[in-house]
Image (tube, grey):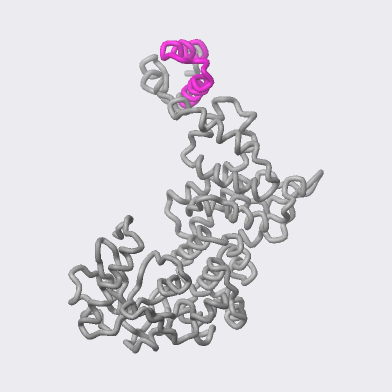
Amino acid sequence: MNAPDATPADLRTNAEMIVRTLRAAGHEAYFAGGCVRDLVMELSPHDYDVTTSARPEDVMALFERTVPVGAAFGVVLVIVGGREYEVATFRTEGAYSDGRHPDRVAFATAEEDVKRRDFTINGLLYDPTTAEVIDYVGGRADIERGIVRTIGDPDERFAEDRLRLIRAVRFAARFGFEIEAATRAALTRLAPTVTSVSWERIRDELVKMLTGPNRGAALRLLEETGLLAAVLPEVAAMVGVEQPPAFHPEGDVFGHTALTLDALEAPTPVRALGALLHDVGKPPTFSETDRIRFNNHDAVGAELADAVCKRLRLSTDVRRQVVEIVRNHMRFMHAPEMRESKLKRLLRRETFADELAVHKADCLASHGDMTVYDYLVQKQAELPAEVIKPAPLVTGDDLIAAGYEPGPLFGEILTAVEDLQLEGKLTARDEALAWVAKNYPLEKLPE
């Protein structure tokens, strides 16, 4: 619903209009939360939230387009210029028994509202009419010192919403901050309880973390605090799993995975999860004979990746693409020796661009040899789409017309013809049909 082309200036102008409208009607109103943190840090906010003394019904009466998404909790979306702005009434909250919504809400003052929020860096208010930052919780000092600290008692803040356990790690990694000692101690102690939160909410935080800055640091911090073992035990199992130094001078599988995440370019959710899970099959396939080996870890990893994606309630399409990245990541090393038909099939895969991005990060995070990556980039540039995936010379209808019965043999014939076509050995339909008649004569086919 949000307008994708809204500029930062547009976002702020619209948010200021909302504040001024509320103020003109006699209500208190401020920017709140992450947008204020970003403004203080001289970053450009991606969205603006407004907090106000106005009740939900007052907000809906003041603006032409509103959506009462959480009116019972004091939250209304105000739509301006095709963009949604969350406007929330000052409130205090009870626990989140369902891991998603507070059990009770009581309307309150601005200071009380701030003190029910998660971390001091997110507890700032900003008055756009005076350019004043209002700080009831020491958030500005913590930003200057680079600290993530809960507002008030960490056990209470985490008990209110266990998702804050993961959010603490995300903010620390994103900004390169430290987690304050008491906050970190509580976080580590309570880490096993994070799974009381819905997997959808956990997924969203992990995806933000894995596609944001300092991804490797985020993964390490998840592991150090025990959160990784709670939500992704398959990834936690990578810790301490040795690798052959000749190929992986960087160390164990976990360290390699963290480095791969850091090396990943344009980290979409599919790429980030593919990078995270590409070696998830190594711990259960570890063996040491002539050297350390992980036989069949790509296939085993694909099964584990599928289970992880299902747990995280990822869409069917995203899950399929992530699993394909994990299943096929070892194929790339053989690309220079592939037959032309096999290489072209690799290049035309739906997930090829994502697989290539993960392959590049994988190499940069280990031996650093980019020979195969450079070869594939060159081939991709040399071979246009119509060469990689030409119109078929022979179709199933052609085979039926020639007297072949539909069945498993169809696939074998069509694949064989396409392989020869991709290798330039068959170039015309009549030539291809003649090849089929010669190599699959009807009179010799089983009844």
- Residue 192, position as x, y percentages in the image: 58, 73
Count of numbered marks: 0
Asked if the magenta segment contains residue 438, the reply would be yes
Answer with left or right where residue 55 lies relative to residue 195: left
- Residue 122, position as x, y percentages in the image: 45, 77
- Residue 168, position as x, y percentages in the image: 53, 73
Q: Which quadrant holds residue 59?
A: bottom left
Residue 365 in sight from this viewpoint: yes
Residue 190 in sight from this viewpoint: no
Answer with left or right where residue 83 lies relative to residue 363: left
Which residue corresponds to the image point at 44% horizontal and 64% vertical from the top-left?
200
Q: Which quadrant holds residue 103?
A: bottom left
**Does 410 sit above or below residue 173?**
above
Q: Nearer the viewer, residue 83 or 321?
A: 83
- Quadrant in which the N terminus appears: bottom left
Asked if the magenta segment contains residue 439, the reply would be yes
Q: Nearer the viewer, residue 366 or 9?
A: 9
Which residue corresponds to the image point at 74% horizontal and 51% vertical from the top-left?
249
Magenta part mainly helix, strand or loop?
helix
**Does 400 sit above or below residue 293?**
above
Q: Residue lying farthest right? A: 290
Magenta-highlighted residues: 411-440
Which residue corresponds to the image point at 54% horizontal and 43% vertical from the top-left?
355
**Does 172 sit above or below residue 380?**
below
Answer with left or right where residue 360 lies relative to residue 312: right
